[in-house]
Amino acid sequence: MKILVQKFGGTSVANLERIELCAKRVISTLEKGYKSVVVSSAMAGETDSLINLARQVSSRPPEREMDMLLAIGEQRAIALFAMTLYKLGYPAVSLCGWQIPIITDNVHTKARIRKIGVRRLLNLIEEGYIPVVAGFQGITEDWEITTLGRGGSDTTAVALAAALKANCEINTDVSGVFTADPRIVPSARKISKISYEEMLELASLGAKVMQIRSVEFAAKYNVRIHVRSTFSEEEGTWIVPEEEVMEKVVVRGITVDTNESRITIVKVPDKPGIAAQIFKALGDAHIVVDMIVQNVSHEGYTDMSFTVNKTEADKAEEIVKKIAEDIGAKEVIRDDKVAKISIVGIGMKSAYGVAGRMFEILAKNGINIKAISTSEIKISCLIEEKYAELAVRALHEEFIEEIEEFETINDKNK
Ligand code: ADP
Ligand code: ASP
Ligand code: MG
């Protein structure tokens, strides 16, 4: 039995007409001889409006109650999706996370999938039904509803594909993964094949087309993902193991992330154990810390900065302020107006001079760098938020558009 997991994002199921288009895509998959398992997100804007409702009640609502609320969005969408398939003559059954079950840990609002039951899905398929699964949600061993973090329906889809040993199709509002967000860089190009490793970096650095955890899952279980547009038949981008990516380039893509805040602790006593105290407390609160910078020490004191996701900045600031008081630091400053710009590519493993070129382009555009972090296949710079789009366009021109020109000239001279 050939199974394809087909995920539809929020804009794809934004209204009833669009849900019907999605249902027709599912039907055409069946006509090609596959069995389909559908995963749907909430209708566009619904998760945001539920979050806004909660914020009107409290600035920090209990996370368990957030999950209870947010799970509604997907439940509504899957029922409408299944009804639409029925109307078109294809029996379907909608299922929430707990009905599969998709079992997660108990970290509310960003739970991780631990186990998936496939028996019910396989039985439904054998009986001739199309399962329509709610993305983004699961259940703990103690029967508590959880959600998987923003964009989590991608992870539901990939995890189901892994459990069912199926391929995974991500249907979205762009025709694939591009060399930069096509909404910011109109000249961005669609990538035909990208490795898990590169996609993982792009996703974790702000390319929200795939949730990072979904790519981690895909890499771990070797799930082949096809990212494509819901609204066209065009071939999209395949996310596959590295050995299948023939074309090697230094920079595969450029990303921008404006979802981070920088927190600086000013005049921290420069002695062993202080950094451990700060970052252990953040870790205990399940806060993911990204770029960390510690300045050169002056007269026994230093400044320490780090970035966290904006949604966790209040919590992080509160924790750090308490520690700052305990250790006698001068003050804690928070800056929400920052952007992290990154260039990503496997070819960077063996290229030299890439960082220098990146810093030069930023300097030429009058953009100051507040922090830098690197890995084998990426370089990230933290800059002022107002320069984010300028920086992405300039870097795209330098690293991606330039290369195309180079390759064309080479071809002609062959
Ligand atoms: P969905 O609702 O289908 O899950 P998302 O909004 O989560 O869709 O993701 C798709 C969006 O990701 C696109 O509309 C695009 O603006 C954005 N995006 C950011 N970076 C990239 C990139 N490198 N390639 C493609 N899309 C990107
Ligand atoms: N509805 C959720 C969100 O908006 C999950 C998803 O769309 O993937 O983040
Ligand atoms: Mg998404």
Image: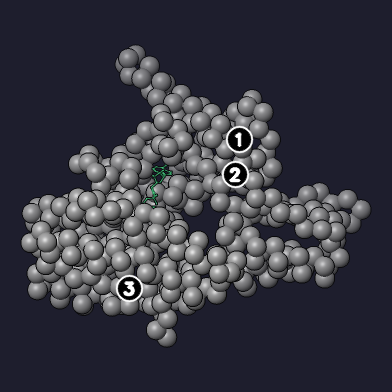
Q: Residue furthest right?
A: 299
Q: Is mark 1 within 8 Å of ligand 1?
A: no
Q: Are marks 2 and 1 in contact (CB under 8 Å)?
A: yes
Q: Amino acid at mark 3?
A: Gly
Q: Is mark 3 within 8 Å of ligand 2?
A: no
Q: Which of 289/275 is in front?
A: 289
Residue 263 location (% of width, % of height): 70, 55
Q: Which of 175/374 is in front?
A: 175
Q: Earlier in the sequence, mark 3 or mark 1?
A: 3
Quadrant assignment for the N terminus:
bottom left
Q: Residue furthest top?
A: 413
Residue 97: mark in rendering:
3
Q: Which residue does the image show at 41% across and 36% down from the upper left?
A: 182
Could you tell me which secondary element the residue under label 1 belongs to? helix
Check disc 1 and report the residue beneath it.
Answer: 387
- Residue 257, placed above or below residue 42: above
Disc 2 from disc 3: Cα separation: 34 Å
Q: Amino acid at mark 1?
A: Tyr
Check disc 2 and report the residue beneath it.
Answer: 339
Q: Earlier in the sequence, mark 2 or mark 1?
A: 2
Disc 2 from disc 1: Cα separation: 8 Å
Q: Which residue does the image show at 38% across and 39% down from the upper left?
A: 178
| Neighbour tally class for label 1: few under 14, some 14-19, many 20 plus, Cα within 10 Å | some
